Image: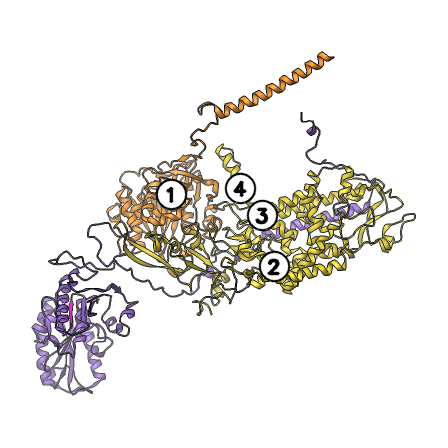
Chain colours: A purple, B orange, C yellow
Amino acid sequence: MYSVMVGERLVGQVKRRVLRKQIGSGEGICCGVFLLIIAIVALWVVMRGRRSDASLFASGDARLAHPTVGTVYKRPTVRLPEAPPASGAPLDAGVPSSVPQPALQSTTPAAPPIGLFPGSVVTAGWRIGTRFQEYDQTNLFEKIDGRESFYFSYDFKRLSCMALETDAGVTIDLEAFDLGTPESAAGALLAEHSGSSAKLDVDSIGLRYATSGAAFFARGRYYCRIVGSDDSAAVSAKVAQIAGETAKALPPAALPREFLFLIDRMRVPAAGLGFFHEAGLGFDFGRDVFVGQTADAELFLVRSADAQAAAELAKRFLSGFASSGEAIENPRAGGRGWFKNRYEESVETAVAVGRYAAGVRKVKDVEAGEAVLAKLIAELEKLDDGG
Amino acid sequence: MMAAEARQSRRKFIREAVTTAGVAAAAAYVGLAPEKWPLSMKDATGERGKPSPPRRRLPSYRVEPPPSTKVMGIAHGEDHLAMLRVAIGAIGGIEHYIKPGDIVVVKPNVAFDRAPKLGATTNPDVLRALIKLLRAAGAREVRVADNPIESPESCFYRTGIKKAAEDEGARVILPTPDTFEILSVPGAALIPEWPFFYRPFIGATKVIGMAPVKDHNLCSASMNMKNWYGLLGGRRNQFHQDIHTIIADLTLMIAPTFVVLDGSRVLMRDGPTGGDLSDVQDGSTLVASTDQVAADAYGFSELLQRKTDPPRYLELARARGLGNTDWRSVSYAEEQVG
Amino acid sequence: MAETPHKLVGFWRFTSVRIISQAFFFLLFLFLCFMTWFSRLGGYPVSLFLEMDPLVSLANAISTHTIYRHLSWSLWILVPTILLGRFFCGWICPYGALHHFVGWLFNLRFAKDRIGSNGYRPIYGLKYAMLVVFLVLALAGALQTGLLDPICMVYRTVAVAVAPATDLLVEGATRWLGDHGMAPAWLVRLSFSPGAAEQRVFKGAWFVGAIIIALVAANLLIPRFFCRVLCPLGALLGWFSRFSLARIERDLTRCTDCNLCMAHCEGASDPQAALRKSECFVCFNCVDDCPEDALSYRFAPGLRPAQSGAQLISKIPEKELKDPAFSRRKLVFSGLIGLFSYPFLRLSAAVNRRGFSDKMVRPPGSVSEPEFLERCIKCDQCLKVCPTNVLQPAGLVEGGFECAWTPVMNMRIGFCQLNCVLCSEVCPTGAIQKISIERKLGSGKHAGDGPIVIGTAFFDQGRCLPWAMETPCVVCQEVCPVSPKAIGTYDEEIRRWDGAVIVLNKPYVRPELCIGCGICEHECPVVDRPAVYVTPVGETRSKERSLLLKTRPGAR
């Protein structure tokens, strides 16, 4: 059937017939030489193969020491404009919650909070103009270019802000600065208030004052500024309402005891209070300095870790005063040094009382100063006992 | 003569007729016989023709710890062999877990082609110490296996894992296409069936996880539980869509004999790849644990020094009864070595 | 060679040694291909055959005016060729050995038919035309010898087609035998790419495979079809062998004109006539086939007196056929073709600055594109050694005809591994310059240079899961190998369509840090058209495709 295939070879013959009859001896020698060359090539390849380029395969610890390209800014998580449902699905973890959830003393209606602010700030006629946003140290300048160093000096942590607007184009900016501590929050408010004639109140909310069309208050570690775009009565009323609602929404916190001390014991008016997180009294070592300005003197006090630290700090204040004034010989001061300030016609001194370094400045002479100082020391001793 | 010729051609005809009939009958049988009959190729529904690779299952490699031993042993120091001995000693000792003749799979993290010092992979020196202990305990064979993200050969080479393993007489098994099988993980949310690096587990009797402590961009931290990710094949890059669930699944997928958390170096940031020495801190800690969830919780708060909430996968694993998220609540021994 | 004592024919003949030589060099070639892999490379001269290929070095010398690294090894071939003739084709060339072997094994013909098939045909002059065209192109700056250079072809064929095919067979056999419990341990070691997690694939592997099949099959029509008709290297060596001192000699007094010498003539060099020196492969089959002992191989026969009675063909000057059968008219014509081909090639927009393809991502260490095209010989050794399979032969899409089979990176198939410079190590011509890992990363003593950038990653926000589909992902950020990571995220909390609140990490590229390695593209779960992809803009090698005005951190 398939006879065509029968006998056909698949491949050529394996052994070939050599037809020539003779061979020269030179041919054999050449063959040998060539085989030798092949062997040398093989040997060379093997030898070369053994010699690998170490740099290709090294794990290269040496090259690890290269300079780091600096830090990379990590933009903070943009949160939902409303808070997540209280007991609903948990957030996908991996990103820490950056918004401290305020403990709402909620008598407000059901309106959900807008970030840090209570929903009740939005009332009839007003709507959200700029959505809730947050800024941290790395990008605060985007919001308030130029002023950020002021807040940084008060230990700035975070700014939460939004804006309301009306159809008429009136806007109200809501800003809540988280400054870490009640002292810093109050300090920032007081620093911005200084020089203003607006009445400063101290009440259950905290420190607050209002100007026409704007309200400012410090509550706990938040310093809030509610600023309207005009100073009409309607806007002022709305600003006051926002301030009240926002203050209620923020966690309550008592005024720092040093402020209470200055007000209650030393009769410092609220407007005379002050707090410097950095560079208090103009000294680089003046950190967390409380200041109280009365009619005839300026009091200051700094809480230290212990009595020894307080004494050292007091010494530094004295030497600081010495650098900008001259010592006054005064045997009645009981060895206490008073300095006459070179630039202001006043005298100043510092003492250590328990854990506090304190002092009196801007008094007209040593006698008046000694009187104020005696009272300060007496009251401080009581305060420190309590602490 | 005519008769003979006629006989010849009749025979030829019969032979050809029978051949033709036989071929036709065989074709008819193969194509038409009911599916259950032998040699039948009939496939009326099309289902028979679909490939159905075998599904594999992993046994539990757990060994009940001896009574009244700790769940977790923590050793601080620089001498890895001594530290490992102390840490494993606290959970019952290597001899309790490894019996002579055991075939042990060790799963380090070799995910990236990185120098060991960069902390992105398991410290080869710690691996060396573990293999020494395993060999001393009588393990017949130690297999070191991982399915890296970058090219397997160079990952094993440059991380020093290959040399460490082979120096100590362990066998490195690289993931090649023929080493993967479909694994069934009953109860898993995402990987009920998934390609798995199965070759090293053929005949294995014990499994030990050995993960470095690393920052992770998505799930916050990568330690023992995330380490098992390196045994998956297939389209594993989809798992980042639900990273916490997959890590909890991985913990369900494999029940190791115990785990060793390699905190000798800690990749603090830029994880899980790292790449800069400034990202790495000395941890000087090794943890052996029969509860990998607790070990990871320890690594998260103590080695990575994170103050935030622990990653959600820990909680998911705890909810499935796979371990404890509060490492302080489990029994542990902590010791400074050397 | 020598005329003195004659023995009976034994084993120590030129033909026996030639077969050993062919087998040796073919196996050496396969061995070197086999070693072209991370764990085997060691210090092996894996590109040896390319480096001793005179056409590679000549064409490179013409196009770049330099002889890169080991290319001077080609003198080991060129100098003996001038003395002995085209012995490379018959004794060393692995591609020639393949054709020789296939023809010997499968081309079964009767002796008369075989004698007919080994006669000289005018079409055999075509290879000289190819050579002239290629060299003129090289002079203009477009190196195309690799299209037909047999060494480049055989390397390319192994890299793109044969090695992956072998791996596929080995893997199948291992799996099948493994299922039956009898896979031998050595089997996996036969793989060309051991430890590769996935079967290696190459773009256009079918075409490279089709070419080798066609050219091998052509041996059944015309023996040594490729070598006789197309091979530009053979043409070059043929032209050099016109000077060769040694040649096949014929004693007319013994010759009976039986033509049996043509029966196994590999080069179709007419040993029965005056001998075409430039066609002769010096295979010595004719010497073996002569029943009258009329043929011999003689060194400088013209210098020696003829033996008494012998009438040697070389002593008849008018019968000397030294030069290739390639007239000056054809030479000029071929030169003109080459001259015009250059603008035709270069006018393709894809190889020009303005029409540059966004797919033309070259491996790290590559010289700028015009220089690259002066150097790359399409041997695809870089593809062979690349551990991640990212290097692919360019098709017509990436760079048109001129770039065909040159290496481009396809990040969907692989990615450029951070600590790897193997492609630069094996490149014989310096199209990918030999660089150290320090140079690639811009570390160590290269800290001031910055890393080598091969491209820049871009996000396709319409396809990215977090950007477009409210689905968490960021595998890209996880795998980004540079420190600090070149991919950052904008984290945003959203209420998803089903009401659940989730955090999306929306990725973005920090272009100053991105080196274009493409691991993000490779690992992107949107596999068919990844949501993050690398294009060559910003590559270090080209100022024309720079992206950023400012230099990157760490760079001078």
* Amino acid marked by disc 3: Phe
Residue beneath label 4, please? C168
CA distance separating discs 3 and 2: 25 Å
Q: Helix or strand or loop: what does disc 1 sit on?
A: strand
Label 3 with label 2: CB-CB less than 8 Å: no
Q: Are marks 3 and 1 on the same chain?
A: no
Give whichever of A70, C463 is nearer the camera: C463
* Amino acid marked by disc 1: Ile
Q: Helix or strand or loop: what does disc 4 sit on?
A: helix
B220 in the magenta segment: no
* Amino acid marked by disc 4: Leu
Q: Are marks 1 and 4 on the same chain?
A: no
- Mark before the other along the chain sequence, 3 or 2: 3
Q: Position of residue B166 (x, y in %)?
A: 48, 46
Tell me the residue at 57%/50% (across/down): C36
Residue beneath label 1, please? B208
Camera-near label (2 vs 1) is 2
Label 3 with label 1: CB-CB less than 8 Å: no
CA distance separating discs 2 and 1: 48 Å
Residue beneath label 3, please? C207
